[in-house]
Amino acid sequence: MVVDVLNEIDTTVSRNEFKAAFFAKFPRADVELIWENVDNAISTALRRAAKENLITKGRRNGKIEIYASKQVVARMVKEREQREAASPNPVTEQNDRRTEQPVMHSEEGHDQWR
């Protein structure tokens, strides 16, 4: 369910933004019939999906946890590569302050995206 909702959102979102989109798709009253602590269950589902590497977790401005589908991250990486290829000055992580896109990290911290 988490992956499906993130695929539909098609951008990076905070936990609260995800919850709003989740309840737009699955009405809260219906979900409460299945889950006792709905907010806790959604947070747990997000953490588990990130831990199982089904989605990508990162931070916005170094503070707010954000989530994205693998499709969104792949698109962000491709767009960045295209921008870098078109740029006369190569962009490095240290000097790239031109974009507001968050750095995305996999749960294990091995992969990083901008």
Image: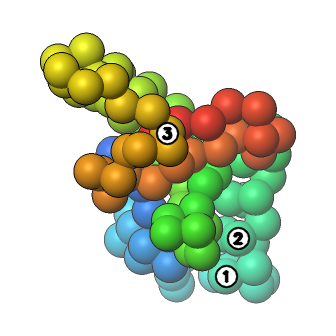
Q: Which residue is mark 3?
A: 93
Q: Which residue is mark 2?
A: 43
Residue at 33% x, 24% y is 90
Q: Which residue is mark 1?
A: 39
How far apart marks 1 and 2 lie (CA) works out to 6 Å
Residue nearer the viewer, 90 or 75: 90
In the rendered structure, the answer to whether residue 104 lies left or right of residue 50 reads left
In the rendered structure, the answer to whether residue 83 lies left or right of residue 27 reads left
Q: What sort of colour scheme is used for the picture?
A: rainbow
Residue at 58% x, 68% y is 62
Amino acid found under the numbered disc labelled 2:
Ser
Q: Secondary structure at mark 3?
A: loop
Tell me which numbered mark, 2 or 3, is placed earlier along the sequence.
Answer: 2
Judge depth for marks 1 and 3 and give the one in front: 3
The relative height of residue 52 versus residue 13 in the rendered view (above or below) is: above
Residue at 41% x, 44% y is 95
Residue 103 spot, x, y in % from top left: 52, 49
Q: Secondary structure at mark 1?
A: helix
Residue 20 spot, x, y in % from top left: 42, 76
